[in-house]
């Protein structure tokens, strides 16, 4: 019981913005709005909204590894792809009966985490850090893209699942709830919306607790000064590895949900563009804060989507400009800057009133 | 009993022989000062003791155990702790959080909060506890890092130029603090240039010169040693 209470107390802390009744009232309001939203919309639009939610997990994984941990990783996209393909291969082979899609979801995330554990072990225990970490992870991502792109031939199959080269894999079953009256498949519609929303809330709150725990303290300490952190008796490589694996699992969750949402996945979801875009959302939002990351990702992503109507090249150029502006104006993130500004204003008002 | 023992420790950086067959014994419970001109290899010796550098040859024993190949964090867990020459506080975190991170593996909950408050008062940083550590003055950063180092309750505390940038009063206070910690059972090895500080705390002094142990003895013996004066003067002329 006391354990549970101390867990909930970790929802607030020095590593996350937002505290006190005002913040949680706002949180409840936003959540209520998100819950009610499908009532005032149609299934198609709601399904499209899920698409935005899907990407938040990979953004959060970057916030964790880069914003909190201080290691820039281009590998999130690789873990996204591994889990996405993993889900496809598993469900195409074993079907969707008896709730297997949910087991496939977990197994696919597990695959991404396992690859991250191996890669991370060599990187962190081999003392690869800073720019080199970025280079190694980018190389892994691009290698994986190249590899998947050349699997067009019929010999590239795992059981019943053809990898299909550049055209990618498709027609895997969506997440399916086993039910007495027959299984309920969750297509990109209201049902999937609520499932993904629930995951989003759980992951967001869970990460808040994690980052405000003593574990999170060590993670930010490593970002600030790894030598000092080790000289306080922390095995920093172990902490970095665990963070990297958690991040990979979150990126993997994004990958599975993306695959489930559109029932396809292609190698280009592991390409250079795919690897850079999450970096931009997170940088623009504010990588060192979970809330800023979520807001930033949703805002930038929907802006990007709106712009692609005029052509995706322009949208990409706009993303680049946005990144440069962020780096120049608010290097810690635009959304984070705005949130901090508001917080300052509110506290000043309170002090004046007092 | 010897708490720390260096046996024939050597370290090269390329062609530079920075630590040259150093033998050093630190007795349990003493305050030992390490002095020597700039570039003598004092900080390097600390990094060898802490496992940031590994000696080309020689052994390091701590409390009777050979720790020569142990990783740094493992040495810390066995009872070593350090304040670096350049303060290594967590700049982007609050002063309070800096101390919390140093204490959290030993204490939890209310006991943790209480110990942080006690340390803040001890370090005279109560008013700055919510500030980012990066915004502190140089002297305050030194204090904070000393606080983080002693928060571990080490058996051996290594201090690399703890009073650099401090006023004479602050230097004296630091000396008193070191003596109090020592009276409570902590062994201390301090690198220091400030002779007033060395005189205030040191029970024994080792002079390091060109990577070698040049002289060893009480502060009076060292001050009276003309050869020691010569190497410092030599540097002043250089
Ligand atoms: N990582 C390193 N690589 C190469 N040379 C180094 C390194 N660290 C220290 N040195 C050299 O070793 C010598 C001793 O340095 P140091 O131990 O910092 O001296 P002190 O602390 O006594 O002033 C200096 O000449 C310094 O330039
Ligand atoms: Mg030095």
Image (spheres, grey):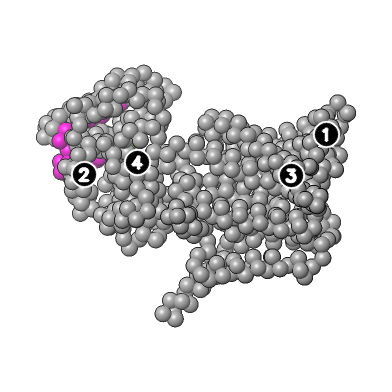
Q: Nearer the viewer, mark 2 or mark 4?
A: 2
Subunit under mark 1:
A
Q: Are marks 2 and 4 in contact (CB under 8 Å)?
A: no
Q: Which residue is mark 2?
A: B181
Q: Nearer the viewer, mark 3 or mark 2?
A: 3
Residue B22 coordinates in the image, percent (x, y) = 28, 23
B201 falls in the magenta region: yes
Q: Which residue is mark 4?
A: B84
Residue B141 coordinates in the image, percent (x, y) = 35, 51
Q: Residue A207, relative to residue A127: is it above or below?
A: below
- Secondary structure beneath disc 3? helix
Q: Quadrant of the N terminus of chain A?
A: bottom left
First in residue order: circle 1 vs circle 3: 3
Subunit under mark 2:
B
Marks 2/4: CA–CA distance: 18 Å
Depth order, front residue of A206/A332:
A206
Q: Say which quarter of the image contains residue A150.
A: top right
A183 falls in the magenta region: no
Q: Residue at x 76, y 65 (%)?
A: A38
Q: Which residue is mark 3?
A: A99
Depth order, front residue of B199/A18:
A18
Subunit under mark 3:
A
The image's mark for residue A161 is 1
- Secondary structure beneath disc 1? strand
Marks 3/2: CA–CA distance: 63 Å
Marks 2/1: CA–CA distance: 68 Å
* Image-based side of A23 in relation to B60, left or right: right
Q: Are marks 2 and 1 on the same chain?
A: no
Q: Quadrant of the C terminus of chain A?
A: bottom left
Marks 1/4: CA–CA distance: 58 Å
């Amino acid at each position: 019981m006391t354990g549970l209470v101390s867990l909930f107390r970790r929802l607030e802390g020095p590593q996350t913005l937002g505290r006190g009744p005002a913040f949680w009232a706002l949180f409840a309001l936003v959540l209520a709005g998100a819950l009610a939203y499908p009532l005032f919309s149609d299934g198609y639009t709601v399904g499209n909204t899920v698409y935005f939610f899907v990407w938040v997990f990979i953004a959060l994984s970057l916030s964790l590894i880069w914003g909190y941990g201080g290691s820039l990783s281009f590998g999130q996209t690789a873990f996204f792809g591994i889990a996405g393909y993993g889900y496809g291969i598993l469900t195409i082979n074993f079907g969707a009966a008896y709730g297997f899609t949910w087991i496939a979801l977990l197994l696919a995330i597990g695959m991404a985490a396992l690859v991250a554990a191996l890669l991370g072990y060599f990187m962190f225990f081999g003392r690869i850090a800073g720019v080199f970490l970025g280079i190694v992870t980018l190389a892994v991502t691009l290698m994986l893209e190249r590899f998947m792109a050349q699997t067009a031939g019929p010999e590239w199959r795992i059981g019943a699942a053809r990898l299909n080269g550049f055209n990618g894999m498709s027609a895997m079953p969506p997440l399916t709830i086993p039910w007495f009256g027959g299984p309920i498949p969750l297509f990109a519609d209201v049902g999937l919306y609520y499932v993904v929303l629930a995951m989003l809330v759980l992951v967001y709150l869970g990460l808040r607790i994690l980052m405000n725990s003593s574990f999170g303290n060590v993670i930010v300490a490593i970002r600030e000064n790894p030598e000092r952190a080790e000289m306080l008796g922390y095995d920093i490589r172990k902490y970095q590895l665990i963070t990297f694996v958690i991040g990979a699992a979150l990126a993997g969750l994004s990958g599975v949900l993306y695959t489930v949402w559109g029932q396809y996945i292609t190698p280009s979801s592991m390409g250079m563009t795919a690897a850079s875009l999450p970096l931009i959302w997170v940088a623009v939002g504010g990588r060192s804060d979970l809330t800023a990351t979520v807001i930033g990702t949703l805002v930038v992503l929907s802006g990007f989507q709106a712009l692609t109507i005029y052509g995706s090249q322009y949208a990409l150029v706009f993303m680049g400009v946005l990144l440069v502006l962020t780096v120049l104006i608010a290097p810690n993130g635009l959304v984070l800057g705005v949130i901090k500004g508001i917080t300052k204003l509110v506290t000043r008002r309170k002090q004046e009133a007092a | 009993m010897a708490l720390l023992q260096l046996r024939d420790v050597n370290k090269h950086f390329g062609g530079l022989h920075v630590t040259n067959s150093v033998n050093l014994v630190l007795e349990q419970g003493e305050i030992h000062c390490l002095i020597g001109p700039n570039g003598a290899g004092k900080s390097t010796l600390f990094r060898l003791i802490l496992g940031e550098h590994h000696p080309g040859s020689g052994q390091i024993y701590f409390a009777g155990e050979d720790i020569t190949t142990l990783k740094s964090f493992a040495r810390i867990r066995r009872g070593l702790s350090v304040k670096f020459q350049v303060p290594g506080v967590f700049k982007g975190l609050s002063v309070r959080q800096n101390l919390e991170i140093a204490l959290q593996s030993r204490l939890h909950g209310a006991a943790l909060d209480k110990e942080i408050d006690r340390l803040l008062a001890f370090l005279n940083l109560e008013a700055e506890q919510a500030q980012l550590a990066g915004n502190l003055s140089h002297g305050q950063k030194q204090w904070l890092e000393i606080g983080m180092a002693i928060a571990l309750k080490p058996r051996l505390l290594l201090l690399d130029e703890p009073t650099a940038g401090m006023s004479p009063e602050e230097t004296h206070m630091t000396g008193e603090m070191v003596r109090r910690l020592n009276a409570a059972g902590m062994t201390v090895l301090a690198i220091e240039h400030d002779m007033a500080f060395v005189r205030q705390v040191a029970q024994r002094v080792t002079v390091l010169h060109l990577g070698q142990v040049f002289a060893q003895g009480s502060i009076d013996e060292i001050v009276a040693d003309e050869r020691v004066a010569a190497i410092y003067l030599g540097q002043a002329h250089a």
